[in-house]
Amino acid sequence: MTDIRRGPGRFGADLTPRERWNRTMHYQQVDYISHLEFGYWDELKEEWLAQGHLPAHFRQPDGQIPDRLVEEYFGVEQFESFSPRLGPLPLREPVIIDESETTITFRDGLGVLSQRQKAGVQTIPHFLEFPIRDRASWEAFRDEFLDPAHPLRVLTEEELRAGEEMSRTSANPVSVWFGSFIGWIRDWTGFEGVALLSVDDPDLVEEMVAHLASMALQLLPPILERGQFDAAAGWEDICFNSGPILSPRFFAERIMLHMRPVMQLLRQHGIDVIWTDCDGNILKLIPLWLDVGLNCMFPLEVNPGNDPVALKKEYGRQLLIRGGFNKFALHEGREAILRELKRLEPAVAEGGFVPHVDHRCPGQVSWDSYCYYIWEKCHMLGWPEERIKEFPALRNWRP
C-alpha cells in the first residue's frame, strides 16, 4: 500500500486546498489529505446554536444558518462553483392550498402538490400530486420550464468574465454543475409515476432523459470553454436501501447512453473527477457509471450496503470516493467514531478517497462527539496537530 500523506514541509510550503484536492484525487503525494464535509441538518445547527457552541452571528437575516459557515468553523475546505443555469426555469410563485393547526398544503413553483408539518423536525413532505403524468403533461412542463433558450438562462458577459476569473485564480477547488438525468424526472413524476412510466411508456421516460442531456450539452460549452475546473458535480438520489428505483437494465438501455456524451464533453475539457450525489445502495449502478465516465461516488452511504473499503479493493484506482464515513457512528460515541475511522484509514491512505460523513450530519449529534470526529479524522488525514487546534470550533475544546 502506498501512503500519499507526507506531512508538512513536503512541498516547501502548504499546498492550497485546490492543489491538495487535485493531488489527493490523482493518487499523488500530498502534505495532508483534503478535509471536506457535506453539511448539517438544520435541526442540528439549531441545537448547537441554542447550546452556545456556534456564534450567534451565524444566523442570517433570512433565519438560516449556512452550512458553509459551520464547516469553516471546523476548518473544512470549500469548493467554489462556476456553472450554467440548468434545471427548471422560471419557477412559479408557491401557492398555499390549505392550512390547519398542524399542516400546510401547498403547490410549489413546479406544480408539485405537497403537505408539510408545521412543527417538529422538517423532513421530506408528503407528496400529493405531481405535474408530469403522461406525454401531454410532459410536453406542457417541458415547454414551460425546460426551454434551453429561455432568457433567464443567459449569463451576461460580465458574469462569464467574473466566473472565468474566479475559476482560474481560486485557491479552492472549482466545480461545474451538470445537473441530473433521472433524479429530477423522479421529482416531477413521483416515484410511483416514474416506475409506472418506465413500464407503460419507456420511450417517454427516455425522451425526458434525452432532453435533460441535450440541455446540458447546449448550456455547458460556454462555461467549459472559459473556466478552469477541478471536478464536475451532478445530483440523482435514485436509490433506496435495496438498490436503484429502476432496473439496472433500464439504466443501461435508456439512461446511460444519454449520459455518455455529457461525460465525454466534460472530459474533453480536462475534467476527470466527476461525481453525482446519490443516496442509497448504488452498487448496481457503479459499473454503469464508470463505463460512461462518471468515476467519483458521493456521498457513499454506508448503512444501505456501500462499503468504501471493499469498493476500493474491487475497482482499484478507477473509482474515486467522497464520503463513506458511517453517520450513525456519530451517535455512538468516541469508540465507535475511532473504530470507523480506523476501518477506513488504509483505503484513504492510498489516495482517491476523501472521507467525510456519508450525508449531512444528522440531528442529535453531540458537540463533543463531532469535535472528536473532526479531531481524529484530521489526524488520520495527516494534518499537523497545531493546525487542527486552530480550527475555531476546537480552540476551546479539549480532546
Image (cartoon, rainbow, N blue to C red):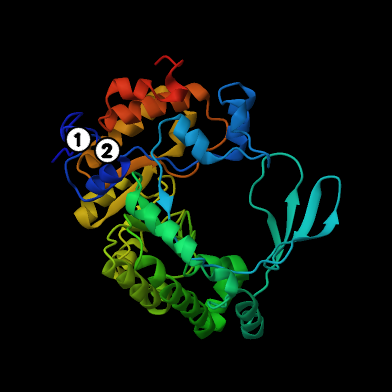
Dot 1: what SS? loop
Residue 234 percent coordinates (x, y): 43, 60
Q: Residues within 10 Å of mark 2 (few under 14, many from 20)?
A: many
- Answer yes or no: is residue 394 visible: yes
Badge 1: few (under 14), some or many (20 or more) residues near its Cα, within 10 Å? many
| Residue that appears at 37% across and 72% down | 262
Mark 2 or mark 1: which comes first in sequence?
Answer: 1
Relative height, residue 108 to residue 377 (above, below): below
- The answer to the question of whether label 2 and label 1 lie on touching residues, with beta carbons closer than 8 A, is yes
Where residue 194 appears, as percent x and y from the top left, is 56, 72
342 or 172, nearer to the observer: 172
On screen, 135 above or below 50? Answer: below
Residue positioned 66% across, 85% down in the render: 136
| Residue tagged 2 | 33
Q: How many marks?
A: 2
Q: Amino acid at mark 2?
A: Ile
What is the CA distance from the residue labelled 2 to the residue labelled 1? 7 Å
**Residue depicted at 49% across the width and 41% down the height:** 39
Q: Amino acid at mark 1?
A: Arg
Left or right: 263 as drawn, with respect to 352? right
Is residue 336 visible in the rendered image? The answer is no
Q: Specify whether 341 is left or right of 64.
A: left
What numbered label is drawn on residue 286? none
Instruction: Give SS at disc 2.
Output: loop
Residue 256 vertical position relative to residue 33 in the rendered view, above or below = below
Position of 264 relative to 122 (above/below): below
Percent across and percent down for residue 18 are 30, 45
Q: Residue under circle 1?
A: 5
> Residue 200 location in percent, x, y?
56, 83
Report the side of 8 relative to 129 (left or right). left
Q: Quadrant of residue 165?
A: bottom left
For the N terminus, which image quadrant? top left
